C-alpha cells in the first residue's frame, strides 16, 4: 500500500484559495495550520483575518475565525483573548494592514504584552488594492503610487517592524523569516511554532514577520519574484530571531 | 440594598456589571471618565476585565472581538470618541455582534466643549457609520432610568445580535441622584444561546466565523434584506416613550434626556400661568415613537421640539406629525442648557401665533 508522506494539514479547509499563482501567502497559511495542529490547539484556536489579500483567510483556516476591519486585527484579537484567556488567538496581517493603518494597534498590543500571536506577511506592497506603495516598500521600488521608484524625500523610508517592536518589553517573541526556499520554509515553520508556544506558555506577545512574494504586483514571474525577495528584501530586512523566551543566539 | 446616592457615570457602570457585563474597553474622555475609573476598580472584583485602549478606534474593535467571542461587553465614550468608533460600530452591526455603547454627549462639532450636549442625535439614530444599518438608541432622563435601561439594553443587544446605544449627556453623567441598583426588573425575553460565538471549534458544533464581508452582490443584498427584517422587528417591538400631561394640552413639547426634565419643570410653570402644555418623551430615539403623535395630533395646536442642539430630533418630530400641526423648535447648544423661562417664552410666542 502506498505510504502517505504529506497531506493537507487538518488546519486548512477544502476551500479553493484565490491567491495568484506563485504567491507565497498559501505556503504561510500551510505553516500556520501545521503548527496549530502539531501543538494540538486547532480546536482551541481563534484566528483573526485582516483586510488585504488574506481577507478570505477565514474560509481557509479550519478553526474559528473573525474578520477584522483594516489594521484592527490586534485589537480584535485582544478582545477575544481577554474573554477567552486559555484559547490560542492569532492574527494574520499584511504589511499595509499592520505597518500603516494598523500601526497603533500592533504597537500597543505588543506594549501590553498581549498574549496573542501575530503572523505578519511582508510583501513590500499593497497586494489586494493593486500594487500601491506600502510602508515596507523598498527605496527605489516601483509601485503604482511610486511610479518613479520610492524616493526618501517624498515617501520616507521602509519600516522595520521587528526591530521596532523588539524594543518593547511586552514583546516576548519576535522573529523575521522568509519562505523563498525549502530551508527557509523549515525555519519559518520553526519560528511560527515557537511563537505559538510562547503564547501557550503565557509568556506574552509574539510576532513572526514572514517575507513573502507578490509576483502579480511586482510584475515578475513566480521564479523571478523568489529571486527578487532574496536579493532585495533580505538585505533590508535581515532574517533573525530578535527576541525569544528561550534566548537568542 | 436601599437607594444610594451615586454619580450617573458610576451608576451606569455598576448597572452594566449587574446586567452581566464583565468586559469594558475604553479611552479617557470628559465628561465620562468616572465610568472608566469605576470599572477599573470594580471589574477585577467580579472576575472581569477592564482595559484602557490606545484609542477609541482600538477600543471598539476590542468590543468586536470580545462580543464575537460571546461576552457581554460595555463601551462608553463621549462625542469625539464616538465619532472615532463609527467604523467599528458599522462592522459590529454588519457582523451582528451584540454590544452596548454609551455616548455621554458633549457639545460639538470638532473638539467642541466638555459641557452637556445633544448634538449627536443624527449620528446615533441614523446608524452613524457607513452602510445600511440601525441600532436601538435609548435615552434615559434620570440615573435610575439609566440603570433600568442598561439591563434592557444588553437584553435587546443579545436578542437581535445588534449593537444598542444609550444616548446620555454630560449632565446625566455628572449629576448625582439616589438610585436603587438591586431591584432592576429582569426582562422575560427569551434570549437565544450564543451558538455563533467564536470560542474554538472544540467548544461548539462546526466552525464559527464572525464577519461582515460578502463579495457576491446577490448574497450581500440578501444579508442586507435579512438585517432589514431584523430592524423592522426592532422598530415594531422596541418603541418606548412617556406621555406627560398630554391629555388636554394645547401645545406639546417633545424632548429627551436631560432636556425632558427641564421641560417637565417648564410645564409646571406654564400651568401656573394657565397654559396647557404637555410632553412627549421618546425613550427610544430609534425606533422613534409614532403613536403618541397620532394620539395627540387632533387636539394639540402645535408641537415644539426642545433639544440641546441646533435642531436634529425636530426632523423626526416633523415626520411623525406629518403636516397635521405646526412643528416648532427651541434649542440651546454648545453646552448651554435651555432654561424653563426661555422655553416658556417661546411657547407663549407660538400660542400667540397659532390662535
Ligand atoms: C479603512 C480601509 N481603507 C482602505 C481599504 C482598502 N484596502 C483593502 S486591502 C488594502 C491593502 C492591503 O495591503 P496589505 O496589508 O499589504 O496586504 P496584501 O494584500 O499585500 O497581502 C487596502 C488599502 C479598506 N478595506 N479599508
Ligand atoms: S496580489 Fe500579490 S499578495 Fe495578493 S494574492 Fe496575488 S500575488 Fe499574492
Ligand atoms: Mg502587502
Image (tube, helix red, strand yellow):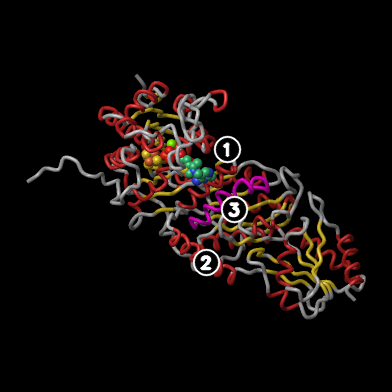
Query: Which dot marks residue B129?
Result: 3
Q: Secondary structure at mark 2?
A: helix
Disc 2 crowd rating (10 Å Cα; few below 14, some 14-19, many 20+) is some
Question: Which label lies toward us, 1 or 3?
Answer: 3
Q: Which residues are magenta?
A: B77-96
> Above or below — where is B251 with respect to A147?
below
Query: Residue B86 at x, y = what percent?
Result: 59, 50
The residue labelled by disc 2 is B230
Q: Cβ of disc 3 within 8 Å of ligand 1?
A: no
Instruction: Specify the label residue B54 is tagged with.
Output: 1
Quadrant (top left/top right/bottom left/bottom right) for the N terminus of chain B: bottom right
Q: Chain of mark 2?
A: B
**Residue placed at 60% from the left, 46% from the top?**
B39
> Where's the C terminus of chain B, which quadrant?
bottom right
Mark positioned earlier in the residue sequence (1 or 2): 1
**Height in image: A155 above or below A249?**
below
- Give how far across and how far down residue B213 sits, in percent: 45, 53
Q: Residue furthest left?
A: A1
**Residue B80 located within the stretch drawn in magenta:** yes
Alpha carbon of mark 2 to alpha carbon of mark 3: how far?
18 Å
Amino acid at each position: 500500500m502506498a505510504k502517505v508522506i504529506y497531506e493537507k494539514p487538518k488546519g486548512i479547509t477544502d476551500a479553493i484559495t484565490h491567491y495568484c499563482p506563485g504567491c507565497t501567502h498559501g505556503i504561510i497559511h500551510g505553516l500556520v495550520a501545521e503548527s496549530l495542529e502539531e501543538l494540538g490547539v486547532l480546536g482551541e484556536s481563534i484566528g483573526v483575518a485582516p483586510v488585504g489579500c488574506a481577507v478570505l483567510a477565514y474560509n481557509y483556516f479550519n478553526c474559528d475565525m473573525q474578520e477584522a476591519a483594516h489594521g484592527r486585527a490586534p485589537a480584535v484579537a485582544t478582545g477575544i483573548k481577554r474573554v477567552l484567556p486559555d484559547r490560542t488567538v492569532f492574527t494574520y496581517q499584511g504589511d499595509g494592514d499592520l505597518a500603516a493603518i494598523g500601526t497603533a494597534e500592533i504597537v500597543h498590543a505588543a506594549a501590553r504584552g498581549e498574549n496573542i500571536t501575530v503572523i505578519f506577511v511582508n510583501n513590500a506592497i499593497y497586494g489586494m488594492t493593486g500594487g500601491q506603495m506600502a510602508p515596507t516598500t523598498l527605496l527605489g521600488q516601483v509601485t503604482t503610487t511610486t511610479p518613479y521608484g520610492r524616493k526618501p524625500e517624498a515617501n520616507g523610508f521602509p519600516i522595520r517592524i521587528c526591530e521596532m517592536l523588539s524594543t518593547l518589553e511586552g514583546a516576548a517573541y519576535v522573529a523575521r523569516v522568509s519562505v523563498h526556499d525549502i530551508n527557509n520554509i523549515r525555519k519559518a515553520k520553526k519560528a511560527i511554532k515557537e511563537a505559538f508556544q510562547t503564547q501557550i506558555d503565557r509568556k506574552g506577545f509574539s510576532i513572526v514577520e514572514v517575507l513573502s512574494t507578490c509576483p502579480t504586483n511586482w510584475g515578475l514571474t513566480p521564479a523571478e519574484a523568489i529571486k527578487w525577495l532574496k536579493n532585495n528584501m533580505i538585505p533590508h530586512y535581515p532574517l533573525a530571531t530578535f527576541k525569544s523566551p528561550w534566548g537568542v543566539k | 440594598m436601599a437607594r444610594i446616592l451615586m454619580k450617573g457615570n458610576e451608576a451606569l457602570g455598576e448597572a452594566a456589571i449587574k446586567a452581566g457585563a464583565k468586559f469594558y474597553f475604553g479611552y479617557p474622555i470628559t465628561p465620562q471618565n468616572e465610568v472608566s475609573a469605576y470599572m477599573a476598580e470594580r471589574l477585577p472584583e467580579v472576575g472581569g476585565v477592564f482595559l484602557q485602549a490606545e484609542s477609541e478606534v482600538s477600543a471598539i474593535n476590542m468590543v468586536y472581538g470580545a462580543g464575537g467571542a460571546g461576552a457581554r461587553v460595555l463601551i462608553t465614550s463621549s462625542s469625539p470618541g464616538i465619532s472615532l468608533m463609527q467604523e467599528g460600530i458599522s462592522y459590529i452591526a454588519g457582523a451582528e455582534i451584540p454590544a452596548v455603547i454609551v455616548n455621554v454627549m458633549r457639545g460639538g462639532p470638532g473638539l467642541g466643549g466638555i459641557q452637556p450636549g445633544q448634538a449627536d442625535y443624527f449620528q446615533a439614530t441614523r446608524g452613524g457609520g457607513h452602510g445600511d444599518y440601525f441600532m436601538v438608541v435609548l435615552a434615559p432622563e434620570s440615573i435610575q432610568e439609566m440603570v433600568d435601561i442598561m439591563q434592557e439594553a444588553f437584553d435587546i443587544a443579545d436578542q437581535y445580535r445588534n449593537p444598542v446605544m444609550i444616548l446620555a449627556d454630560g449632565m446625566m453623567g455628572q449629576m448625582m441622584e439616589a438610585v436603587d441598583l438591586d431591584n432592576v426588573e429582569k426582562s422575560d425575553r427569551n434570549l437565544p444561546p450564543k451558538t455563533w460565538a467564536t470560542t474554538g471549534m472544540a467548544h461548539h458544533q462546526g466552525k464559527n466565523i464572525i464577519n461582515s464581508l460578502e463579495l457576491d452582490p446577490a448574497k450581500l443584498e440578501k444579508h442586507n434584506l435579512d438585517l432589514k427584517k431584523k430592524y423592522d422587528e426592532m422598530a415594531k417591538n422596541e418603541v418606548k416613550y412617556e406621555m406627560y400631561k398630554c391629555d388636554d394640552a394645547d401645545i406639546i413639547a417633545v424632548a429627551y434626556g436631560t432636556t425632558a426634565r427641564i421641560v417637565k419643570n417648564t410645564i409646571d410653570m406654564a400651568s401656573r400661568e394657565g397654559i396647557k402644555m404637555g410632553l412627549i418623551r421618546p425613550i427610544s430615539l430609534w425606533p422613534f415613537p409614532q403613536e403618541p403623535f397620532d394620539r395627540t395630533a387632533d387636539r394639540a395646536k402645535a408641537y415644539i421640539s426642545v433639544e440641546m442642539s441646533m435642531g436634529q430630533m425636530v426632523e423626526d418630530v416633523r415626520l411623525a406629525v406629518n403636516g397635521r400641526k405646526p412643528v416648532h423648535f427651541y434649542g440651546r447648544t454648545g453646552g448651554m442648557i435651555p432654561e424653563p423661562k426661555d422655553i416658556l417664552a417661546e411657547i407663549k410666542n407660538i400660542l400667540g401665533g397659532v390662535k
